[in-house]
C-alpha cells in the first residue's frame, strides 16, 4: 500500500516538474541561467499532494467495489435463505393443518364409537345378569360360570368405553376458567371413594385452602383420576396414606397427590401418559390405562405440565402445575 502511494507521489512530482520547466523555458521564455528551485518547489508540492489524494481515492474506490461485490453475494445468499425458510414455514403450516384435521377426525371417531358401543354393552351386561339369575335358580354351574365371565367382561368393556369418552371429551370440551377450591373438591372425591370402598382403611391428608385457576369440571376429572389411582395402588398397604397439597418446583407452585402404595420404576415414567399403557398387570390392579392420558391432556389444555416421582414399593407422587390467573 505504501509503495503504491510512493509511486503515485514520485510520478506526480516528476510530471509537475517537467511541466513547470516546459512552461518557464518555452512559454515564458525564461533563460536557463535564471531558473531557480523556487519555480519548481510549489508546483511539485501541489502536484505531489494531488497525486497522493488521487492514489488514496483510487485505493478506496477499489475497496468499495470489492465490498459492494461481497455485499451483493451476501444479499443473494440471504434472499435464498429467506425463500427457503418461507418454503419450510409453508410446509410446516400445511402439515400442522393436516395434523389438526386428523386429530379432529380421530377424536370425532373415538367419541362416536365409544358412544355407540355403550348401548350394546349395556344389553350384553343386562341379559347376562338375567340369565345368571336363572342359572342360580336352576343350579347349572357351568353356564353360571360362563355368564359370570361374560358379565365381568362386559363391565370392563363399559369402563373402558367410559374412559375413552372421558378422554375424547377432555380434548373437545370448551375450557371455562375460574377460581377453584381444590381442597373442597378433593374432600368430595375422597368421600365418594370411601362410599365405593368402605372396607379400605386409608389415612387422608388434604392441605386446606388450595386455590387454582382452572376449569372446574375438567379439574375434577384430573383429581378423580389421581385420587382413584392412589386409592387403588394403596389397596394392599396395611397403613395406607394419601396426601394432597401444594409445593414449589423451580419457583413454580405445583399441586401434588402422594401415596405410599406399590409405586413404579421411574425409568418407565415416559409411558405413564400413553393411552392403554399400564405399569402393573390387570391381574394385580384393574384399570383401563387411559386415566393418566386424560390427566395429561387436560393439564396441557390448561397450558400446564404434569410429572411424577416414584420408586417401586415406596409409593408415588404426581404433580401438576397450572398458569396463574392473568391480572
Image (cartoon, helix red, strand yellow):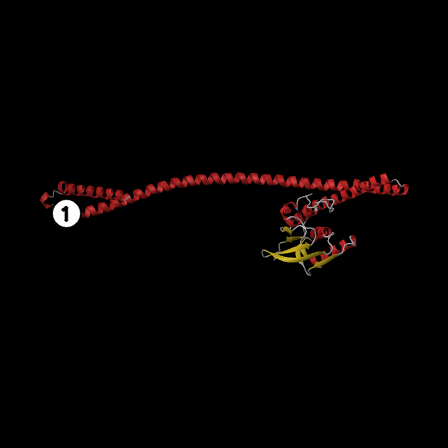
Image position, residue 228 (x, y; %): 72, 51
Q: Is residue 121 above or below residue 223?
A: above
Residue drawn at x 19%, y 48% as measured from the top left:
42
**Res. 136 image quadrant:** top right
Mark 1 = which residue? 37
Q: Is residue 202 above or below residue 139?
A: below
- The outermost residue toward the bottom is 208
**Res. 216 image quadrant:** bottom right
Badge 1, how many Cα within 10 Å: few under 14, some, many 20+? few
Q: How many marks?
A: 1
Which quadrant of the figure contains the C terminus? bottom right
Query: In this orientation, which residue lies closer to the viewer: 144 or 85?
Result: 144
Query: In this orientation, which residue lies closer to the viewer: 59 or 140?
Result: 140
Residue drawn at x 19%, y 42% as measured from the top left:
14
Image position, residue 40 (x, y; %): 17, 46
Residue drawn at x 22%, y 43% as measured from the top left:
10
Amino acid at each position: 500500500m505504501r509503495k503504491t502511494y510512493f509511486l503515485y507521489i514520485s510520478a506526480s512530482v516528476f510530471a509537475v516538474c517537467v511541466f513547470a520547466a516546459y512552461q518557464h523555458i518555452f512559454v515564458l521564455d525564461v533563460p536557463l541561467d535564471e531558473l531557480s528551485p523556487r519555480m519548481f518547489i510549489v508546483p511539485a508540492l501541489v502536484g505531489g499532494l494531488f497525486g497522493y489524494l488521487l492514489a488514496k481515492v483510487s485505493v478506496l474506490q477499489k475497496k468499495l467495489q470489492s465490498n459492494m461485490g461481497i455485499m451483493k453475494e451476501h444479499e443473494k445468499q440471504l434472499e435464498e435463505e429467506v425463500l427457503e425458510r418461507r418454503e419450510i414455514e409453508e410446509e410446516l403450516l400445511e402439515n400442522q393443518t393436516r395434523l389438526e384435521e386428523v386429530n379432529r377426525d380421530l377424536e370425532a371417531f373415538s367419541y362416536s364409537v365409544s358412544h355407540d358401543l355403550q348401548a350394546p354393552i349395556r344389553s350384553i351386561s343386562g341379559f347376562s345378569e338375567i340369565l345368571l339369575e336363572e342359572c342360580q335358580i336352576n343350579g347349572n354351574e357351568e353356564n353360571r360360570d360362563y355368564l359370570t365371565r361374560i358379565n365381568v367382561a362386559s363391565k370392563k368393556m363399559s369402563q373402558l368405553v367410559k374412559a375413552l369418552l372421558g378422554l375424547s371429551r377432555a380434548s373437545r370440551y370448551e375450557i371455562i376458567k375460574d377460581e377453584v377450591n381444590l381442597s373442597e373438591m378433593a374432600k368430595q372425591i375422597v368421600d365418594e371413594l370411601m362410599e365405593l370402598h368402605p372396607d379400605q382403611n386409608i389415612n387422608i391428608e388434604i392441605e386446606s385452602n388450595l386455590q387454582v385457576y382452572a376449569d372446574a369440571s375438567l379439574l375434577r376429572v384430573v383429581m378423580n383420576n389421581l385420587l382413584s389411582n392412589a386409592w387403588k395402588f394403596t389397596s394392599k398397604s396395611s397403613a395406607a396414606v394419601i396426601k394432597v397439597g401444594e409445593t414449589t418446583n423451580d419457583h413454580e407452585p405445583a399441586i401434588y397427590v402422594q401415596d405410599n402404595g406399590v409405586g413404579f420404576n421411574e425409568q418407565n415414567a415416559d409411558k405413564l401418559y400413553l393411552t392403554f399403557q399400564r405399569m402393573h398387570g390387570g391381574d394385580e390392579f384393574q384399570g383401563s390405562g387411559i386415566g393418566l392420558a386424560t390427566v395429561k391432556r387436560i393439564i396441557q389444555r390448561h397450558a400446564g405440565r404434569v410429572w411424577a416421582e416414584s420408586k417401586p414399593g415406596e409409593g408415588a407422587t404426581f404433580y401438576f402445575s397450572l398458569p396463574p390467573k392473568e391480572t
